[in-house]
Amino acid sequence: MKPAIVFVAPHRLPFLVGTVQLGALMLWWLVALSGLHFGTAAPPGDTIPPSLLHAPLLMYLAIPPFFFGFLLTVFPRWMGYPDLTKTAYAPVGFGYAAAAVTSWWGLGAGSDFVVVIAFALALIACLWGTGTLLSVALRERRDGKGPTWHGWSILAAFAFGLGGQTAFLIFLVQPSATDTLLIANRLGLWAFLLPVFLTVCHRMVPFFAGNVVEGYARWRPDWLLAALWGGTITMLAGAFLDFVVLTTTGAALLAGLTALMAFKWWPRGTAPALLWVLIIGFAWAPVGYALTALYSLGLPLGRAPEHALTIGLASSLIVAMVTRVTQGHSGRPLELPFVGKFAFAGIQAAAIARTLAAIHEENGPWLVISAALFLSRWHLGQREIL
């Protein structure tokens, strides 16, 4: 792929990096799971076991390139400004590309030190990208416009994400500080990844649906963003303070709000497949948050809530949103090709398999099946994303 093509738009290099990185990390995880449960050859290890690296690798190295590929494209447009220049967006793609290659080296060699370098590079790329987005939001305020609440919601989520990455780097350097790992995982999932997805859906789904479904009512009140953050902060406070009532209340509120969003957004008429994958992918949100509320009450669900939200919600929306951007910015029809449909169906199967594995006390074969399903369908989806 020629550099001129890769850098012609903000989304191309980050999407390329994110797609390859997510596939590579899931392949590494599949090999690690197979070695653990079936005694096959496993990746070399160092002090920190693969099970503790798995979530942070995905949250901080694999998914953020997709976020920035999308946000560096749409953020200025949300606020009525011209597209960003290459000097503004190219360093983000470069940074995550360097982090990806370094992470493969560290994981392949079993070197925690090299993995630290990879996360540090990702943190630098995230700082650059967040600073670029913040400069656009501040320009809007200086010009006496806005505020665009979607933009500030995204920036709040990235602030939590930067805090989570910093906490994980501290853990990597000092593994005895296990509290920092807990902070990194909780902030990364509940206050970073999920709020970004929910905010983007709040902005994107009604807009897109209103353009492709006749008579569609675009429902996206501003109070909903505040309510989603209220539920998130309440749930996080309960988790950190070990106060079950707060955790359950926050998770139940988020389950109810996302269920309302799915109901309001559900097309009442004929809709294209690209919208349906957005809606169906989003429908995992109330499921995941409801499972979180039940888990906080003591129901033995294992990691089912997290994987309903990461594989079911996040991975489904990545396929839908990346396809939407790549199709729209390449002049192609806003349609979901057969390969995309097949990949999306496979991700749903992987989400169900992983949720069942968690409910069945992290059943080893189900874990391997879930990872294999995800990897095989993601590999097919790459053809469309790239």
Image (cartoon, rainbow, N blue to C red):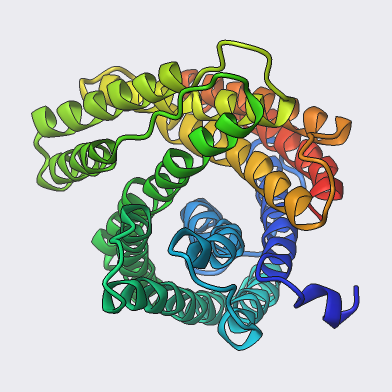
* x and y percentages locating residue 276 in the rendered image: 64, 24
> Seen in the image, is 128 located left or right of residue 252?
right
Quadrant (top left, top right, bottom left, bottom right) of the C terminus: bottom right
> Seen in the image, is 272 located left or right of residue 213?
right
Q: Which quadrant of the view contains residue 146? A: bottom left
* x and y percentages locating residue 41 in the rendered image: 77, 51
* x and y percentages locating residue 215 in the rendered image: 55, 19
Quadrant (top left, top right, bottom left, bottom right) of the N terminus: bottom right
Picture mark count: 0
Any part of residue 59 in sight: yes
Q: Is residue 54 above or below residue 139?
A: above
For image coordinates 87% across by 30% down, the residue present is 338
Q: Nearer the viewer, residue 76 or 378?
A: 76
Q: Nearer the viewer, residue 118 or 39?
A: 118
Q: Is residue 259 above or below residue 104?
A: above
Farthest residue to the bottom: give it: 87
Farthest residue to the top: give it: 268
> Seen in the image, is 306 located left or right of residue 314?
left
Q: Is residue 102 above or below residue 107?
A: below
For image coordinates 46% across by 23% down, the residue present is 217
* x and y percentages locating residue 206 in the rendered image: 49, 33
Any part of residue 41 in sight: no
Q: Is residue 262 above or below residue 155?
A: above
For image coordinates 29% across by 21% down, the residue present is 256
Q: Nearer the viewer, residue 136 or 348?
A: 136
For image coordinates 42% across by 73% down, the residue present is 130
Q: Nearer the viewer, residue 92 or 327?
A: 327
